[in-house]
Structure formats: C-alpha cells, structure tokens
Image (cartoon, rainbow, N blue to C red):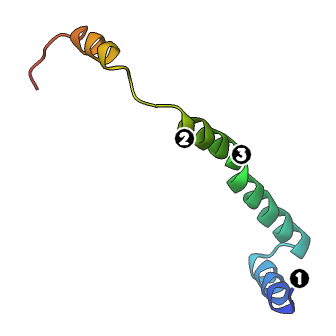
C-alpha cells in the first residue's frame, strides 16, 4: 500500500475515532457490497445481447386490448 494512502487512512481513522483496522474493515465491506452484483449484470448483459427483449407485436396488442379505455 502506498505510504500516502496508509497515512490518509491513519488520519481518517483517528478523526473518526476508530481503529485503523475498523476503518479498513468498513472500507472492504463497502467495496464488496458495491461489487456484489457485478456478475449478475454481466450475465444479464450477455443474455440480452443475444436475445430480443421486446414483446411480440401480437402479444402486445392482446395485452393492450385487455385494459379498459380510461380518460386521464
């Protein structure tokens, strides 16, 4: 770890009143949460990159006709 980052982490931990270990634990936990679903997004992108994701025209017309006409 570069000295500048280590020093900044040490200063932040001191300012927050927590240990450096607690700061690193929180940082890694937040990083894991942020990237938890990266694989899901990539998999969905791959699937929908190959498959059409729009409704069939006839099915769309049938669904639309099943709703009553209403004024807004």
Q: Which residue is mark 2?
A: 49
Task: Estimate the x, y position of residue 58 in percent, counting from the top left.
Answer: 30, 14
Task: Estimate the x, y position of residue 69 in percent, counting from the top left.
Answer: 13, 14
Where disc 2 sits, the SS reads helix
Q: Is residue 12 above or below residue 34?
A: below
Residue, x 47% and y 31% (percent of image)? 52
Q: Residues within 10 Å of mark 1 (few under 14, many from 20)?
A: few
Determine the CA span between mark 1 and mark 3. 27 Å
Cβ atoms at labels 3 and 2 below 8 Å apart: no
Q: Nearer the viewer, residue 8 or 68?
A: 68
Cβ atoms at labels 1 and 3 below 8 Å apart: no
Residue, x 88% and y 75% (percent of image)? 20
Q: Nearer the viewer, mark 1 or mark 3?
A: 3
Left or right: residue 53 compared with residue 35? left
Residue, x 46% and y 31% (percent of image)? 53
Q: Nearer the viewer, mark 3 or mark 2?
A: 2
Q: Which residue is mark 3?
A: 39
Q: Which residue is mark 1?
A: 1
Q: Residues within 10 Å of mark 2 (few under 14, many from 20)?
A: few
Left or right: residue 72 compared with residue 58? left
């Amino acid at each position: 770890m570069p000295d500048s980052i280590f020093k900044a982490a040490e200063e932040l931990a001191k300012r927050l009143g927590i240990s450096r270990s607690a700061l690193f634990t929180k940082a890694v936990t937040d990083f894991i949460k942020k990237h938890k679903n990266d694989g899901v997004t990539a998999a969905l992108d791959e699937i929908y990159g190959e498959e059409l994701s729009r409704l069939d025209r006839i099915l769309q017309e049938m669904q639309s006709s099943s709703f009553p006409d209403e004024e807004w």
